Every structure is written in C-alpha cells, then in structure tokens.
Image (cartoon, rainbow, N blue to C red):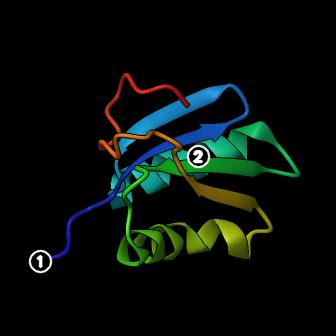
C-alpha cells in the first residue's frame, strides 16, 4: 500500500498541512473558491518525497487544474529529509 504524502498547502493567507486525503483536497478546493478568480495553490512536500508522492498530489488536485487554478508543487529544502509535520515552516 502506497503511503499518503504529507503536504503543506497555501492559498492566499490560508495554510493547511497534513496527509493529502480527499478531505484535505476538498478543503483546499473550498479555500480556492473563496479566494476568487485567479486562484493559486502552493504545495510543499517533504524533501524526500518520491515520484509516486508527486503523482498522488497531481491526481488529488486535478479538479483544481481543470478549473484554471495554478498549482505550484515543490519539495521542501530541508537537509535532513524529515517528513513535514503540522508545525513545519512553509
């Protein structure tokens, strides 16, 4: 079974972090809807995130892209490669 990637997401001034579940993806979608036209989401994954994690993020957030939302997805620059936690800096 594939691990669910931990992410940090920012939509405007709203920050969310945790495992990328369908519930978290829906919350991010709601944040984008409230932010108005020209939505943008910034996603951060753990520095050691693999290609499967990047693909999982892409799959979960595909509905946003179809609505014209710009999604920027990056790995963190943490040298230790530790997984993101709720208190990690964006």
- Above or below for 11 versus 65: above
Pointer 1 residue: 1
Q: Earlier in the sequence, mark 2 or mark 1?
A: 1
Q: Is residue 72 left or right of residue 45?
A: right
Tag 1, which secondary structure?
Answer: loop
SS category of the residue bearing label 2: helix
The Cα atoms of the two marked residues, 2 and 1, are separated by: 29 Å
How busy is the neighbourhood of tag 1: few (under 14 within 10 Å), some, or many (20 plus)? few
Which residue occupies the foreground of this view, 12 or 78? 78
Closest to the observer: 65 or 57? 57
At x 79% / y 50%, what residue is drawn?
Answer: 39
Tags 2 and 1 in contact by the CB under 8 Å rule? no
Residue 13 to residue 41: above or below? above
Find residue 15 and report its horizontal and vertical position in percent. 55, 30
Q: Nearer the viewer, residue 21 or 33?
A: 21
Q: Could you classify mark 2 by the number of other residues whose Cα lies within 10 Å: few (under 14), some (14-19), or many (20 or more)?
A: few
The disc label shown at residue 89, or none: none
Locate the C terminus and report the quarter of the image it occupies.
top right
Front: mark 2 or 1: 1
Please, which residue is most extreme toward the front here? Answer: 79
Q: How many marks?
A: 2
Residue drawn at the location 41% of the way across and 73% of the way down: 56
Q: Quadrant of residue 35?
A: top right
- Picture coordinates of residue 32 (x, y %)? 68, 46
Q: In the picture provided, is 39 more to the left or to the right than 23?
A: right
Quadrant housing the N terminus:
bottom left
- Picture coordinates of residue 79 (x, y %)? 43, 41
Q: Which residue is mark 2?
A: 30
Q: Is residue 48 above or below residue 17?
A: below
Residue 78, position as x, y percentages in the image: 45, 39
Q: Residue at x 30, y 44 (%)?
A: 83
Residue shown at 71%/39% (left/top)?
34
């Amino acid at each position: 079974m594939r691990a669910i990637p931990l992410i940090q997401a920012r939509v405007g001034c709203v920050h969310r972090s945790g495992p990328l579940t369908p519930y978290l993806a829906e919350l991010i979608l709601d944040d984008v809807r409230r932010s108005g036209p020209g939505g943008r989401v910034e996603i951060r994954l753990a520095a050691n995130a693999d290609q499967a994690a990047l693909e999982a993020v892409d799959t979960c957030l595909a509905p946003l892209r179809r609505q014209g939302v710009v999604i920027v997805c990056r790995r963190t620059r943490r040298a230790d490669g530790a997984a993101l936690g709720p208190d990690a800096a964006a």
